[in-house]
Image (cartoon, helix red, strand yellow):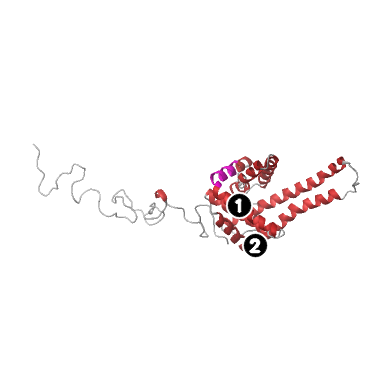
Amino acid sequence: MTTPPPPGTPPHDPSGSTGPGYGPPSGPPSGPGYGGPAGPGYSSPSPYPGGPGGGGYGPPSGPGGYMSAPPPTGGYRTSQLEPVEAIKYGWAAFTRNIGPFLLMTVVVLLLGGGFSILGSYLDGSFDLDASSTNANAAFELQPWGMLLSLVGSILASILSLGMLRMAFDVLDGRKAELGRMFTGYNVGVGVLTGIVVSLVTSVGLLFCILPGLAFSFFMLFASSRVVDSGAGVGQAISGSFTLVKDNAGPVFLWFLLLILLVIASVCTCGLGFFVTVPLFTISTAYVYRVITGGQVAQPV
């Protein structure tokens, strides 16, 4: 026979509670931003990490209940690639750091075109009989121009890597500085990556042109992988291919805008290249950071 409970004892609840007013609290949460139990063994964290109470999280602000990352210092952040924004960002960064970018653009254009012109001049400076059909003599003169063009291309590619380094500094919230052009990455790997990409592109252009154009398109971020991520040659090439493949639509639209700018530069007798070259470099770094989820700071 069961002994009845003493007077005043609340009735037994099979669910484990002991009746109204007993057991875990069922009312409003006792800690800010947290709806869990409060009492011995429990903490009442604050709505945000690092706030009073420690270790808590605020209400989710992104899809699926995840908190979105706070914007980096500088206040600029974008979650997806917008081609027009990439061009606008490149222009803003260029105009705020016009000195170093314009100076390096002038040097790159002079090296890239100057050595080729010098090679052509040396090829034509020899006194050859115009009526002669001595093709071998003409062939022997070609390596001079090819050699100077190669030297100019390598030097221009090194400086282009330096410009890309300055572009990533701007994305990190820094001013572009000439003294940081060759810091934070392996210049040799960057040059070797450029040579490999150029050779494969040249071979592809020999086969109906389209393979070479397609390969160069997929290699848009090979140098960025080296400069910003410290990748090797193979990682730079494979990583660039994957990035372009996974973001082919917006990347193509952005690249199409750059082609239109190049055409406009040609129509200005080449003067527009002093703007197009740094714009291409900075916007390339911007696009790379956006599609990889990296930091994008407001240009300073």
Q: Is residue 239 magenta?
A: yes
Tell me if residue 248 can be seen: yes
Rendered residue at 59%/44% (across/down): 240
State left or right for residue 267 relative to residue 129: left
Q: Which quadrant: the N terminus?
A: top left
Relative vertical location of residue 38 with respect to residue 134 in this rendering, above or below = below
Residue 178, x across and y down, in percent? 66, 57
Write down the residue under mark 1.
256
Q: Nearer the viewer, residue 292 or 40?
A: 292
Circle 2 packing at 10 Å, graded few (<14), some (14-19), many (20+), is some
* Type of amino acid under label 1: Leu
* Type of amino acid under label 2: Ile
Q: Is residue 166 magenta?
A: no
Q: Nearer the viewer, residue 196 or 245?
A: 245
Write down the residue under mark 2.
98
Q: Earlier in the sequence, mark 1 or mark 2?
A: 2
Q: Which quadrant: the C terminus?
A: bottom right
User: At numbered mark 2, what does the secondary structure look like: helix, strand or loop?
Assistant: helix
Rendered residue at 59%/57% (across/down): 87
Tell me if residue 181 can be seen: no
Res. 216 image quadrant? top right
State left or right for residue 66 relative to residue 200: left
State left or right for residue 298 relative to residue 216: left
Circle 1 packing at 10 Å, graded few (<14), some (14-19), many (20+), is few
Relative vertical location of residue 120 with respect to residue 88 in this rendering, above or below = above
Start-end of magenta stretch: 238-248
Task: Give the distance between the C-alpha atoms of the residues marked 1 and 2, in whole angstroms.
Answer: 24 Å
Secondary structure mostly seen in the magenta stretch: helix
User: At numbered mark 1, what does the secondary structure look like: helix, strand or loop?
Assistant: helix
Residue 238, x across and y down, in percent? 59, 41
